Image: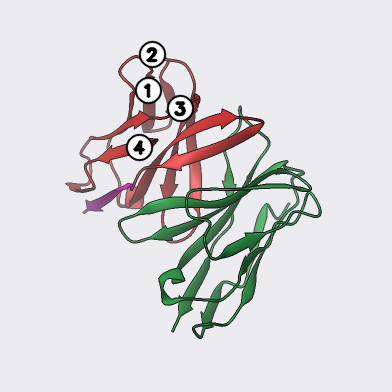
Chain colours: A red, B green
């Protein structure tokens, strides 16, 4: 059975802290690993990772994938209250022309002033 | 460019009623999916489509039907609503394997 496990499930930090969110996966026909940020409504796309060891960065956020150990991490440096959200990890898989995502349960990050 | 548009945003149904959640995208994406999101459960795939006229079941398809008559539209039908279908429903679309999925803003459905 395909599965994606995120840890921790929730996290409370102070502004300025650095956080690391974890995602492990076991997915048949794995294609890529995606990270989303969900505030009040729709998940918004952060990163897609397809190659091991290549870090992707966007401002204070960065992410890396290890395809041998089947995990990814999302780092947020110098956290701000606006980073408070649920961070979702999804493993993309394909087969018979399809392309779908299996999501983890998310990590709820709360950044307090 | 509207992206992925879902209607309605909120809906209350009585047990046994049927309804259709609408989803439309204007990005010419071939891949479209419906998810439900429940507390502590993450996003679970209900049905998906790889193009007009082609649909298939996801992880939790029971009680739902879909059709894809055009590239733009992918409606989700609840056949006979049950309280267990109380959830937030998201529609998403994508170009394909080298792209992420773009999500709509969701429909919050309550079945009483």
Q: Which residue is mark 4?
A: A4
Residue B33 visible from this viewpoint: no
Q: SS at mark 4?
A: strand
Residue furthest to the right in view is B70
Q: Are marks 2 and 1 in contact (CB under 8 Å)?
A: yes
The residue sitting at 57% across, 82% down in the picture is: B17
Report crowding for label 3: few under 14, some 14 to 19, many 20 or more residues within 10 A (C-alpha): some
Q: Earlier in the sequence, mark 1 or mark 4?
A: 4
**Front-most of residues A57 and B52:** B52
Q: Against A80, is B91 above or below? A: below
Residue span colored magenta = A105-112
Q: Chain of mark 4?
A: A
Judging from the image, mark 1 belongs to the subunit labelled: A
Between discs 4 and 2, the one toward the N terminus:
4
Same chain letter for marks 1 and 4? yes
Q: Which mark is residue A64?
A: 1
Q: Which mark is residue A53?
A: 2
Please determine if labels 4 and 2 lie on a single subunit: yes
Note whether A9 is above or below A17 in the view shown: below
Using the rendered image, report if marks 2 and 3 lie on a common chain: yes
């Amino acid at each position: 059975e395909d599965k994606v496990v995120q840890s921790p499930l929730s996290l409370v930090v102070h502004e300025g802290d650095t956080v690391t969110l974890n995602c492990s996966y076991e997915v048949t026909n794995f294609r890529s690993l995606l990270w989303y940020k969900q505030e009040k409504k729709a998940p918004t796309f952060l990163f897609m990772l397809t190659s091991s060891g290549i870090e992707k960065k966007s401002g204070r956020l960065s992410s890396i994938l290890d395809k041998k150990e089947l995990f990814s991490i999302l780092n947020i440096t110098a956290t701000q209250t606006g980073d408070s959200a649920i961070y979702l990890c999804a493993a993309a898989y394909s087969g018979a022309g399809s392309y779908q995502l299996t999501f983890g349960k998310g990590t709820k990050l709360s950044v307090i002033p | 460019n509207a992206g992925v548009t879902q209607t309605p945003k909120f809906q209350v149904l009585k047990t046994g009623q049927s309804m259709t959640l609408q989803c439309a995208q204007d990005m010419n994406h071939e891949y479209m999916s419906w998810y439900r999101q429940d507390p502590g459960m993450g996003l679970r795939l209900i049905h998906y489509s790889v193009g007009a006229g082609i649909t298939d079941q996801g992880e939790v398809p029971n009680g739902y039907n879909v059709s894809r008559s055009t590239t733009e539209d992918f409606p989700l039908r609840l056949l006979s609503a049950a309280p267990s279908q109380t959830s937030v429903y998201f529609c998403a679309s994508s170009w394909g394997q080298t792209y992420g999925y773009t999500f709509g803003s969701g429909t919050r459905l309550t079945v009483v």
